[in-house]
Image (cartoon, grey):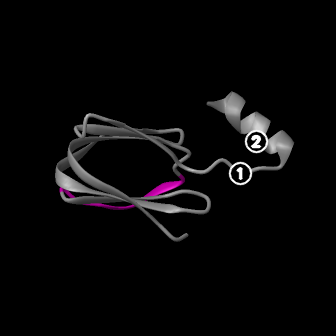
Amino acid sequence: MEFKREIAAALGEALGIRCTVVGGRGAYFENVRRIASFSAEEVVLRGRREVYAVTGKALSLGKYCAGDVVIFGDIVRIERRGG
């Protein structure tokens, strides 16, 4: 992960949030600046330039460390909102 940041910095680019969804039961996010809000039905993540809202049921955080966030639960939708 640090290697990607070093490359982006050298190129003068900012890494946006990247998301990987696994079977609707979990999602892995990279480059998250902070968790803007959290409930069992919605998690809102802020990146440098964008905001993502994850909606579903029984959502929980599996990991939140060094810009990485793992969300577990029945994920229904992931929506990119303006920054």
Residue at (67% x, 31% y) in the render: 2
Quadrant of the image containing the N terminus: top right
Say which residue label 1 marks. 14
- Left or right: residue 45 compared with residue 11: left
Residue at (19% x, 59% y) in the render: 41
Residue found farthest to the left: 58
Relative image position of residue 13 (x, y in whole percent): 77, 50
Q: Is residue 57 magenta?
A: no
User: In which quarter of the view is residue 49 placed?
Assistant: bottom right
Tags 1 and 2 touching, CB below 8 Å: yes
Q: Is residue 39 above or below residue 25?
A: below
How packed mark 1 is, by other alpha carbons closer than 10 Å (few <14, some 14-19, many 20 or more), is few
Instruction: For marks 1 and 2, give the CA distance.
Output: 6 Å
Magenta span: chief secondary structure: strand
- Left or right: residue 17 compared with residue 78: right
- In the image shown, does 62 or 8 lie closer to the viewer? 8
- Left or right: residue 75 compared with residue 78: left
Residue at disc 2, secondary structure: helix
Residue at (23% x, 45% y) in the render: 60
Relative image position of residue 20 (x, y in whole percent): 42, 37
Residue at (24% x, 40% y) in the render: 24
User: In which quarter of the view is residue 5 placed?
Assistant: top right
Relative image position of residue 65 (x, y in whole percent): 47, 38
Say which residue label 2 marks. 8
**Label 2 amino acid?**
Ala
Q: Magenta segment range?
A: 33-40
**Label 1 amino acid?**
Ala
Residue found farthest to the bottom: 82
